[in-house]
Amino acid sequence: QVQLVESGGGLVQSGGSLRLSCAASGRISSIDPMDWYRQAPGKERELIASITGSDSTNYADSVKGRFTISRAGTKNTVYLQMNSLKPEDTAVYSCKMSVGPFDYWGQGTQVTVSS
């Protein structure tokens, strides 16, 4: 079993920054890939950032150049540094870890960007 807990969401003004954390525990290894998704009201869930066990990263065009995904040294915590936030970044942000054939999700954290 794997548990994921996100933190770091909140209310920020346009142009501001936030850092989200996703702490994983349970049957995990240092090579499990992790992703950040977001879902805005009335919209489909969107994959915005990914990191592999070898720390290779990938980003959606909507956040490229503004968001950075990274892992802590122990590999069981993933961060999403979000800079130059825009009102359209307002969403519930969730992390996902893939362990073998299984996907595990955190509970999500709300990010609200005011104009």
Image (cartoon, grey):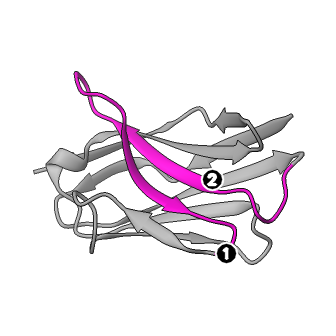
The residue beneath circle 2 is 22
Give the CA separation, mark 2 to mark 1.
18 Å
Residue placed at 51% from the left, 53% from the top? Answer: 8
- Label 2 amino acid? Cys
The residue beneath circle 1 is 54
Query: Closer to the observer: label 2 or label 1?
Result: 1
Q: Give the camera-side residue of 52 and 113.
A: 52
Q: Which residues are magenta?
A: 28-54
Q: Quadrant of the N terminus?
A: top right
How many numbered tags mark residues here? Answer: 2
- In the rendered structure, the answer to whether residue 29 lies left or right of residue 66 reads right
- Rendered position, 65 above or below 31: below
Per the image, label 1 sits on a secondary structure element best described as loop
Per the image, label 2 sits on a secondary structure element best described as strand
Does label 2 or label 1 sit earlier along the sequence?
2
- In the rendered structure, the answer to whether residue 88 lies left or right of residue 98 reads left
Pinpoint residue 60: horizontal percent, then vertical percent: 31, 57
